[in-house]
Amino acid sequence: MALEQTKRAGMTKLFTGTAPHRVRLGVNIDHVATIRNARGGKHPSPLAAALQAEAAGADGITAHLREDRRHIRDDDMIAIKAGISVPLNFELAATSEMIAMALKIRPNAACIVPEKRQEITTEGGLAVIGQETRLADQLAPLKEAGIKLSLFIEANQADIDAAVAIGADIVELHTGRYCHDSMGRDGELLRLQTAAQHAASVGIECHAGHGLDYDTVSPIAAIPTIEELNIGHFLIGESIFRGLPAAIEKMRQLIDAARPNPAGIN
């Protein structure tokens, strides 16, 4: 047991100061910007949402700077990084423009996601297999700058191994199919469990996210080798009815209940 705890403690961490028993919650504030952009102006403020999320118990803030700037904008990223005290997870496509922006912002982590101009939201994991050399060369400046490299991928061993091969610190497993295919949910959960276990076995930190809500989060939070969940759209939508702090607090309660912490470590 002591050896296993030592191994877990030595794994690469995106957020420091947090024990491995507790699942971290990253809150994605993209769609606060979506609402703002519908009318223009400055309200509602993504930075204000990030600060509320932090105060409500979020362990980190996630924001996706898309190439078309449909929600988060360059100045949002600058303001969020400067304003929050928790880590920033910067989601971006693997393009020279976005990598340059990440190097300018210097987030704690850069999460590489696939991006299509016409998609409503991210539709699946990044294609890593067969792209290892290109991605390793393209993303090397992020690593050299001390930014944690995360890849948003499908839950399979081959993509995890490819992520390790290019030097990624983190993989984030795509939970969209698990959330949206109720008939196939049991099979998707097993796939996620197997992938998360494999990630731990090869020494890469494992996160998960996309589409999670109050009804679907608990089984994912219960997977012992998942260390962080990133949740956004549902929490921003739920905040319309109960307020953002209350929406986050309920999610935090569900996550904590799914992963009991007998040591009482925060």
Image: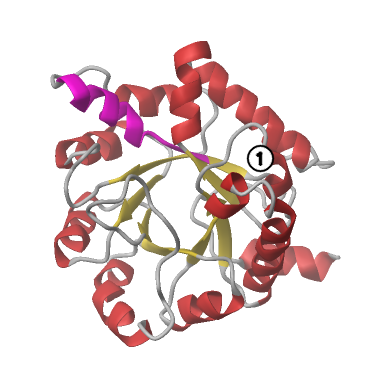
131 lies above or below 148? below
Q: Quadrant of the C terminus?
A: top right
How many labels sit on residues? 1
Q: Tell me if residue 54 is in the magenta stretch.
A: no
Residue 245 in view (yes/no): yes
Q: Nearer the viewer, residue 189 or 99?
A: 189
Viewport quadrant of the N terminus: bottom right
Q: Nearer the viewer, residue 67 or 163?
A: 67
Query: Horizontal and vertical percent for residue 30?
Result: 33, 36
Relative to 49, is 235 on the left or the right?
right
Instruction: Determine which quarter of the picture holds residue 139.
Output: bottom left
State the residue position of label 1: 216
Q: Would residue 190 be found to the left or right of residue 135 on screen? A: right
- Identify the main secondary structure in magenta: helix
Identify whether 149 is placed above or below 85.
below
Q: Which residue shows up at 29% across the image and 58% down it?
A: 115
Q: Residue furthest top?
A: 242
Query: Which residue is drawn at the image coordinates 66% and 61% (left, top)?
Result: 192
Residue 175 in sight here: no
Is residue 31 one of those drawn in magenta? yes
Compared with 180, 133 (above or below) is: below
* Vertical position of residue 167 compared to residue 173: above or below: below
Which residues, given as a range, are shown in magenta? 26-39
Mark 1 is surrounded, within 10 Å at the Cα level, by few (under 14), some (14 to 19) or many (20 or more) other residues, namely some
- Callout 1: SS: loop
On the image, the x and y values in percent for residue 25 come to 55, 40
12 relative position to 34: left or right: right
Q: Label 1 amino acid?
A: Thr
Question: Residue 259 placed where, x, y %?
Answer: 76, 43
Residue at image location 20% in from the left, 58% down from the top: 98
- Place residue 130 in its image quadrant: bottom left
